[in-house]
Image (tube, rainbow, N blue to C red):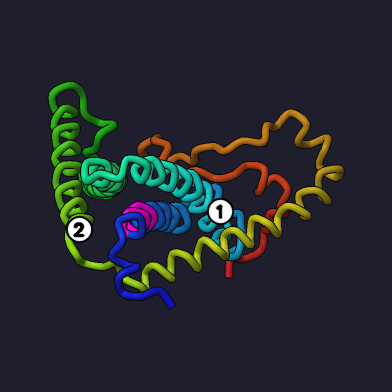
Amino acid sequence: MPTSSFYKKTIVKVLYIVLSTTVFYVFLEWVFHVTKPSFMWTMTIWQDIAVFLLTALVLVVPEIILILLLWGISKLFKSNYAEGAFQWFGAIFSALISASLTLILIDNFTYTLFGVGIVTTRRIPRAFYALFFLILIALFFRNKLAFLRASEKVSPFLSYLILSLLLVASLVFLLQIPASGLGKNLQAKDSANLPDIIVLGRNSRSKRAWFIRPISFWEKMPISTSPRF
């Protein structure tokens, strides 16, 4: 069991704020697509859960690699400036995600209720959205940097929850590898011209792309036409 001091380490706190923000961002976008008419309505609830886990995994793995790489570089210099620069990186990276999520939620709310949003504005009105976005980044950055510099530790419960989700997502991904190999020959003709890529799903009202999904995973997975529950 990690000690209390472990949860106060800079690397642990940076991983915590970045990964928790990313997973929360993916979760809210997943809820939006699950509860609104979209491509996910043709899938079972288990397939919906799988797409949430795999999407989170696709985003989180590169973040972990980048954070560990920058942390290793900062340790080479062994100075307070390097430590401070690493804290700044963690704060700004997490602040960008939090600001984007907040702006999307507000934009979806105003567009749904009043028909006013980013896509309906031009020039000066849209510039206000940009200014608001910058203000959000500054506010979140200040809050997260203060957290990283303080002696406050991260939540062990949320840390284990995020770790558990990533482990389950990794297991789901590994289980799909044999299934993909078995179904490759059966769907060779149908998918010959379809690239194995990641695409963005679209919000049907605002025509904006916010959500990603692995195409190859679903093309090799049977689509259910039965009720979702």
Residue tagged by mark 1?
A: 54
Numbered circle sitting on residue 147:
2
Left or right: 134, with 217 as reference point? left
Asked if residue 93 is positioned above or below residue 166 in the image, the reply reads: above
Q: Secondary structure at mark 2?
A: helix
Residue 49 inside the magenta-drawn segment: no
Q: Are marks 1 and 2 in contact (CB under 8 Å)?
A: no
Camera-side residue: 172 or 159? 159
Q: Is residue 204 above or below residue 43?
A: above
Query: Which residue type does callout 2 highlight?
Result: Phe
Quick check: can you spot residue 203?
no
In the image, what residue type sits under mark 1? Leu
Q: Nearer the viewer, residue 121 or 183?
A: 183
Instruction: Determine the CA span between mark 1 and mark 2.
Output: 29 Å
Residue 52: x and y, percent? 51, 56
State the mark number for residue 145.
none
Along the line of sight, the residue nearer the viewer: 10 or 128? 10
Query: Does residue 124 appear in the picture of this structure?
Result: yes
Query: The residue tagged with tag 1: helix, strand or loop?
Result: helix
Magenta: main secondary structure: helix
Q: Left or right of 175: which side holds 52? A: left
Position in image of residue 81 (x %, y %): 22, 41
Q: Is residue 18 magenta?
A: yes
Q: Is residue 167 above or below residue 220?
A: below
Residue at 30%, 56% (x, y): give it.
Answer: 10
Left or right: where 89 falls relative to 61: left
Q: Magenta segment, which residues?
A: 13-19
Q: Position of residue 219 (x, y in %)?
A: 69, 45
Question: Which corner quadrant holds the N terminus?
Answer: bottom left
